[in-house]
Image: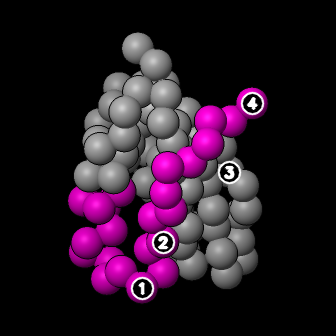
Amino acid sequence: MRPAAIGVLDLREVSAPRTSPLVSLFFGSLAPGASFILVSDQNIEPFYHQLDVEQEGRLLWEDLEEGPGRWIAQIVKPLD
């Protein structure tokens, strides 16, 4: 069972240079066990790889929708 998402980070209206730092910041603000929904009009796989490296594999990622036109994932900060 997925944890309830605390919010939605919708990148469709965010300029490209701001997206990566925003995803990192949003994930960093999560309490262990919390999650958020990431939405974009472009492939979000690069954000998975970015967070995987930054968090040394300590994240759970579930693709909910995979384009075209809209990509959605739920991202969880696991309990330690």
Which of labels 1 and 4 is toward the front? Answer: 4
Residue 60: x, y in percent?
55, 33
For the residues labelled 1 and 4, the Cα–Cα distance comes to 30 Å
Which of labels 3 and 2 is toward the front? Answer: 2
**Type of amino acid at the residue the image marks with label 1:** Glu
Image-based side of 62 in relation to 34, left or right: right
Residues in magenta, as a range: 1-23
Q: Nearer the viewer, residue 13 or 34?
A: 34
Query: Secondary structure beneath disc 1?
Result: loop
Q: Nearer the viewer, residue 11 or 42?
A: 11
Q: Which residue is at 65% across, 75% downward?
A: 70
Q: Nearer the viewer, residue 38 or 41?
A: 38
Residue 35: x, y in percent?
51, 42
Q: Earlier in the sequence, mark 3 or mark 2?
A: 2
Which of labels 4 and 3 is toward the front? Answer: 4
For the residues labelled 1 and 3, the Cα–Cα distance comes to 20 Å
Q: Quadrant of residue 42?
A: bottom right
- The residue pinned by badge 4 equals 1
- The residue pinned by badge 3 equals 63
Q: Which residue is at 37% across, 33% downward?
A: 31
Category of crowding for the residue at label 4, using alpha-carbon neighbours closer than 10 angstroms: few (below 14), some (14–19), many (at least 20): few
Q: Earlier in the sequence, mark 4 or mark 3?
A: 4
- The residue pinned by badge 1 equals 13
Please say whether residue 15 is one of the residues in the magenta stretch: yes
In the rendered structure, find residue 10 and report the number of the disc placed on it. 2
For the residues labelled 4 and 3, the Cα–Cα distance comes to 14 Å
Q: Are marks 1 and 3 in contact (CB under 8 Å)?
A: no
